[in-house]
Amino acid sequence: MGMHASGRSRRVAWAVVSGALVGWTVPALGAEEQASSTAPEIDPQALSALNRMGAFLRDQQSFAVRAETTTDEVLTSGQKVQFSGQSDIQVRRPDRLRADISSDRKQRQLFYDGKTFTVNGPRMGYYASFDAPPTLAKTIQEAEQRFGIEVPLVDLFYWGTDQSGVRDIQSAIDVGPARVQGVDTEHYAFRQDGVDWQLWIEKGDTPLPRKLVITTVKEPAQPQHAVLLDWNLRPRLDDAAFAFVPAKDSHRIVLEEAKARSRQPD
Amino acid sequence: MRTTRILSLLAITSSLGLFAGAASAREVHNTTRTHVNTNVDRGRNVNVHRDVDVNRDVDVHRDIDVDVDRDYHPVARVAGAMVAAVAVGTVVRALPSSCSTVVSRGVTYQNCGGTWYQPRYAGTDVTYVVVNPP
């Protein structure tokens, strides 16, 4: 494993190993290591790997990706519970998107057909729509900012753009090689305000993100959101896949603007 | 006036199963971040509105069973009897049991034992605002 690792990743691996070995008998050493590891460190190669992946993703004119997610929620007692979910996302640039999202608790669908954006709850029997801008980027932005709709894996659309927040990264390290679901990847770890996050990027000509873990560090319980990604870069996506047709017994309801929600009712 | 408001809060609280610590162990303290990059007020969680906006009359915390599809009822809910006192304009995340869908002049309502709710999407969550009978 160490053969292909860079000097830095060997150092990290060594720190992990030595921490694990020594930690049993000398707990104080663990504390010291923690203190010294808070110094920010930016590996330019980790950032360029992130940018290369972003550029590759943006080059894909159409793709389908399945995301298997696990998300910790923190109860008021401090206890963590974990929920599972699955998102199927289909994209055809510049103006088509569909997402089928299901978690332990709910199901949602998002449709963008170039003109209209719709959120649908198949089990609820409710849907709501807004007139969408002509491009995917603008539509995702409007869904988020105006209506508070989260498009799953929205990071995929931001990486490699000005909005990706590479400037916000305070620490970037190359952890080393790793296999994710049978695929050879390189494992990177980043820190920025509020989150520590890790990314596993496929090696070779298709630098796809294969796994993502986000740790919310401001919560004492440090809850995590983990995603495994399964890609199809040659999907067959016809217009019908992106067109929303309401079920016979479903009802259109109001889509509330996010601003309206901050007003106190009385 | 104030008493009515408190009563209606009690009614809603109990209807959500959050009353008197009965379900307090099931409240979610905060929401985990699911995106690294967000256009919504960078550095802040896009999910935060869940905790601060909806259910503001009840409790800043949400119950893990409240943000769910309507037909998912893992925990028995308090019957709808007390909900009659809910004030118009109140926003809730879950309906009492035994509601019927009514469409009037193109608007969809839920009639729950005489209290009328209008469902709407707040992000991808469905919330219900108490309204006057159509």
Image (tube, helix red, strand yellow):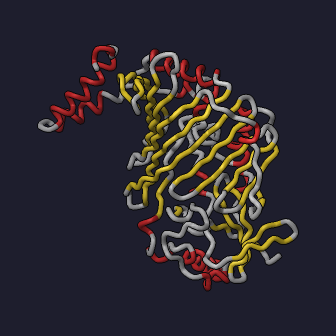
Could you say where residue B83 lies in the image, as x and y percent from the top left?
64, 80
Q: Position of residue A185 (x, y in %)?
A: 42, 24
Observer-nearest of A264 and B83: B83
In the picture provided, is A203 more to the left or to the right than A16? right
Q: Is A86 rendered above or below residue A192?
A: below
Q: Say whether residue A165 is left or right of residue B123.
A: left
Q: Quadrant of the N terminus of chain B?
A: bottom right
For the residue pair A204 and A144, the one nearer the viewer reads as A204
B27 over B17 or under it: above or below: above
Q: Residue at x 67, y 77 (%)?
A: B99
Work out whether A209 lies above or below B59: above
Q: Position of residue A171 (x, y in %)?
A: 43, 26
In the displayed image of the protein, which residue is found farthest to the right?
B105
| The one of A238 and A136 positioned closer to us in this rendering | A238
Please give the name of the residue rendered at 33% of the width and 20% of the height, measured from the top-left corner. A9
Q: Where's the C terminus of chain B, which quadrant?
A: bottom right
The image shows a total of numbered marks equal to: 0
Which of the 4 quarters of the picture holds residue A184? Answer: top left
Tell which of B69 and A197 is nearer to you: B69
The percent coordinates of residue A177 (x first, y second) are 36, 22
Residue B6: name its quadrant.
Answer: bottom right
Residue at x 68% of width, y 41% of height: A98
